[in-house]
Image (cartoon, rainbow, N blue to C red):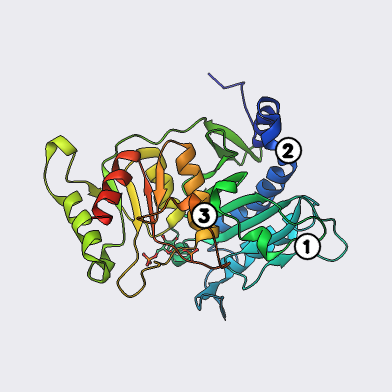
Amino acid sequence: MIPTQVITISRHIMEQERKYPEASGEFSGLLSDITLAVKLIARDVRKAGLVNILGLTGSENVHGERVTKLDEYANRVLYDILGRTGHLCVLASEEAHSILTIPEGYPHGKYVFLFDPLDGSSNIDANATIGTIFSVQKRISAGGPGTLEDCLQQGSRQVCAGYIVYGSSTMFVYTTGHGVHGFTYDPTCGEFLLSHEDIKIPEKGKYYSVNEGNYHSWADDTKKYIDWLKETDKATGRPYGLRYIGSLVADVHRTLLYGGIFLYPGSVKKPEGKLRLLYEASPLAMVIEQAGGEATDGKTRILDIIPKDLHQRTPLIIGGKDEVGTAQRFLNT
Ligand code: FBP
């Protein structure tokens, strides 16, 4: 039977605004700007092999990483669309060294937008799942152009967070602090339609996700936890199966739906790990917590970490309550 009850993102957010007037504010406008931007990104991701968008730009980003053409394109599309609509006072991107101010002549709004324009860039040319991750904060500065302080807010103050996976289908997953909802893009009507309402992460899963290639650079307690996951013990559902795509957004999306745990631990040489707090760990932590899971750096809840730097890194351990609880016990022995 053809479903007649189709709910688009803007309709969903309007319903949320009715249910939680205090929470949503002028979100429907901001969210429809985001959906327009990611529709354009998805369009070019889908035909990446046909248009000159694969490969590298030849330049490096603030992290010394080689920038891909799709990284640069996604970064520009999000800034060009979101910077001009009057909802934002400032933006910050994983790809940009410093804060991104609102273009001359455009109004300043009350929100701050932080984003990883294209996550999983190492997988682009291999046609594996990649994504976009975003976080929205309310400004703390009085008015006019936003500031660095507006961007350096702790994750628990986020008013909205989410991600888009460009995989077998394109999915938009977001939360405004009232549950996690997933929308699948239907190219025949050009809309993201509600397909996964109020997603809850399974209490206990059967997969773990980590780059085992880094095993020898880990601290002993991390090694002990990963070894424990691989031992055989029916009562605790072990051994866990290993799943690692190498795109954070894809590995966390699978963990959200199937349960289990994703880890990007620190190493002995780099105890702060690889992933970025503001653009990757914080928004995904809000999504997973809203779905009933947990996210930590091994000691502190990710959403309680107070950012000191725009490109601060953090270890990330995220997933179901059962698994993250056990991991923390190993990491705090
Ligand atoms: P970017 O692609 O946004 O730089 O993200 C970093 C990332 O690609 C994550 O998506 C992924 O989880 C991780 O790095 C993979 O790192 P590694 O190759 O060391 O396993």
> Which tag, 2 or 1, sits closer to the chain's start?
2
Residue 15 figure quarter = top right
Q: Is residue 216 left or right of residue 321?
A: left
Q: Position of residue 284 (x, y in %)?
A: 49, 49
Q: Secondary structure at mark 2?
A: loop
Which residue is outermost to the right? 105
Question: Secondary structure beneath disc 1?
Answer: loop
Q: Which amino acid does the dot numbered 2 rest on?
A: Gly
Q: Is residue 218 above or below residue 289?
A: below
Which residue has dot 2 on it?
25
What residue is at 30 percent from the left and 44 percent from the top? 325
153 or 34: which is nearer to us?
153
Q: Residues within 10 Å of mark 1 (few under 14, many from 20)?
A: many
Mark 3, ligand 1, within 8 Å: the answer is yes
Residue at (36, 72) in percent of width and height: 270
Furthest residue in direction bottom, as rendered: 58
Residue drawn at the location 61% of the way across and 22% of the way down: 5
Cα–Cα gap, marks 3 and 2: 26 Å
Mark 2 or mark 1: which is in front?
2
Q: Is residue 321 left or right of residue 75?
A: left
Return the x and y of residue 189 as percentages of the image width and height: 66, 37
Q: Position of residue 7 (x, y in %)?
A: 63, 29
| Residue holding disc 1 | 102
Looking at the picture, tell me which residue is in the foreground, 209 or 171: 209
Relative depth, front residue between 328 and 50: 328
Quarter of the figure with residue 203: top left
CA–CA distance in space, label 1 to label 3: 24 Å
Residue type indicated by callout 3: Gly
Mark 3, residue position: 131
Quarter of the rendered structure image containing ligand 1: bottom left
Q: Is residue 265 above or below residue 327?
A: below
Asked if residue 54 is positioned above or below residue 144 in the image, the reply reads below
